[in-house]
Image (cartoon, rainbow, N blue to C red):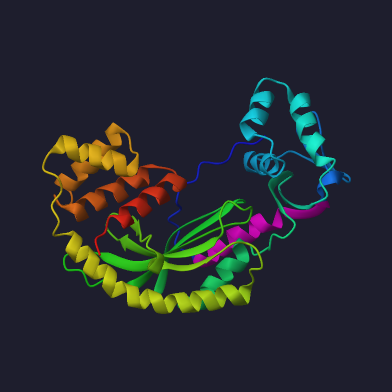
Amino acid sequence: MMMNNIEMLDTVKDFDALIEKANTIQSMCTDYKVPANSIRMTNKCNLKFGEEELPLSRLATGHLCGKLNVPSRYFTRLVDAHQEALAAANINCWLENDKRNLFLRGYAGMIRGVLSGSYSVYDAPEILTTVREVFDPQHFVLKGSFVNHERLHLRLVQKEMLDVEGEDLYAGITLDSSDVGRSGLSVKFFIWKQICTNGLTISKSAAKMFKQKHIGINRDDFAEGLTIGLNSFYNLKDKVAESINETRKIPVNSDLEKLMEEVKNATNLSDQATEKVIQLMQVKYAPNKWGLINGITEVAQDYTLETRLQLEEIAGSMLVG
């Protein structure tokens, strides 16, 4: 089984290069729709179907265990104890009586995902092409991205600065999707701070501009959803600017020990990371709730993409209004 790559945000700002990278990944992918009862796991924990025998990624292993109600921790424990034959026997016991169709997504000689037969293919290259068609490059620019064989993350921001005095803030969107079921396709309102490249994801329902699972999704639906979402984007800009101004008026707890505890409870950060948040607030930003939010989003850059997104959404939820 393969380890996943550590996911960090790429600051390359060339949209064409991003699409080219997505297409290169796509060229290394192969899909297989096969009946579950025609698949067997070998004693090397590879999947064998037809004339193919391929290893599974860690994510795909979890998918398969989940679909067969085999606890993934139990499976991994067997493999780690060099009991691969027993692990495979557990999987094969349930596969042989399973009449469902499974959708196996391959990449570079491995299985990257084990999905249901109803999964709709709408992959990163198609998504990026649609985004480029909807978002006018004269008004929006790419500020960050991540794409690999499992997921897509995109950050687009407006060229026009938000109307918040003394701040270098820009409104934009984040887009998340996965070709292998790690997430649905979603687009959210986003605030980007230019000097520090901090990101702030607004998590309220009104800021979710598009969301759909990879079931029945297609290009026309997504393009229409993005266009509708853009209308709410422009309405939301002024409201978020007002929220930021109000948040700047709110002082933080003057008791540093209690403030540390509040930040740790809200973010799940370590003591060291929490201290860094508070230090940034005090030295670089301002001793108010908006300064605290900025401290969190800057510290978020020290983490892998998954954790960074979580912290940015937590910070976004701290805005008042």
Horizontally, residue 235 falls left or right of residue 40, namely left
Classified by dominant secondary structure, the portion drawn in magenta counts as helix
User: Which residue ends up furthest to the left in the rendered image?
Assistant: 254
Tag count: 0
Q: Is residue 83 above or below residue 71?
A: above
Residue 197 pos. (x, y %): 32, 56
* Observer-nearest of 133 and 275: 275
Q: Percent from the top left, x then y, of residue 253?
A: 14, 45
Tell me: residue 274, above or below residue 242. Answer: above
Residue 209, image x, y percentages: 45, 70
Residue at 25% over, 69% down: 241
Q: Is residue 281 visible?
A: yes
Q: Is residue 139 visible?
A: no
Q: Is residue 148 left or right of residue 87?
A: left
In this rendering, position of residue 284 left or right of residue 120? left
Quick one: quadrant of the N terminus?
Answer: top right
Image-quadrant location for residue 17: bottom right
Q: Position of residue 29 (x, y in %)?
A: 71, 54
Specify the segment rendered in magenta.
15-34
Outermost residue, top side = 81
Quarter holding the C terminus is bottom left
Q: Is residue 32 magenta?
A: yes
Q: Residue at x 25, y 43 (%)?
A: 277
